[in-house]
């Protein structure tokens, strides 16, 4: 019983790590795209940065939901 719980916990941890890696790669692509498009500049404030990133992620989520 305990061995199964441990195996399940290890499996879950691996899946979360894999998802987090994908999330980080996606975020990196979004930030790179926004920099290239001029949406994010060195003078951007943190709130402007977060707004641009969140807007882009929402757009991507909407496309994925179609």
Image: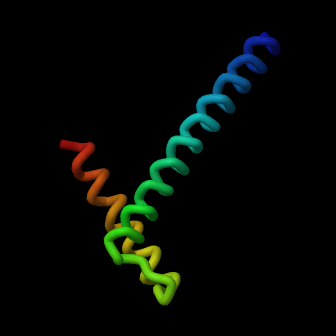
Residue in the foreground of this view, choosing between 8 and 1: 8
Against 41, residue 37 (above or below) is above
Place of residue 65 in the rendered image (x, y in percent of width and height, measured from the top left): 24, 43
Residue at 50% in and 84% down: 42
Where is residue 52 shown, x and y percent of the image? Answer: 37, 73
What residue lies at 58% left-to-right and 42% top-to-bottom?
Answer: 21
Query: Nearest the camera: 27 or 19?
Result: 27
Instruction: Tell me if 30 is positioned left or right of 3 in this view.
Output: left
- Please tell me which residue lies in front, 12 or 39: 39
Q: Is residue 12 above or below residue 55?
A: above
Q: Residue furthest right?
A: 2
Residue 25 lies, in percent from the top left, at 51, 48
- Give the color scheme: rainbow, by chain, secondary structure or one colour: rainbow
- Quarter holding the C terminus is top left
Task: Specify whether 20 is left or right of 13.
Answer: left
Where is residue 41, by image quadrant?
bottom left
Say whether residue 22 is left or right of residue 3.
left
**Residue 18: x percent and y percent?**
59, 34
Residue 43's place in the image compared with 8, above or below, is below
Q: How many circles with numbers are drawn on the protein?
A: 0
Q: Where on the picture, by quarter, is residue 38?
A: bottom left
- Point 78% across, 10% down: residue: 1
Question: Residue at 71% across / 26% down in the picture?
Answer: 9
Residue that sits furthest to the front in the current view: 36
Name the foreground residue: 32 vs 60: 32
């Amino acid at each position: 019983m305990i061995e199964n719980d441990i195996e399940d916990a290890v499996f879950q941890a691996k899946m979360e790590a894999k998802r987090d890696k994908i999330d980080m790669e996606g975020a990196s692509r979004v930030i790179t795209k926004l920099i290239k498009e001029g949406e994010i500049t060195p003078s951007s404030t943190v709130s402007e940065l977060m707004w641009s990133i969140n807007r882009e992620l929402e757009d991507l989520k909407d496309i994925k939901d179609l």
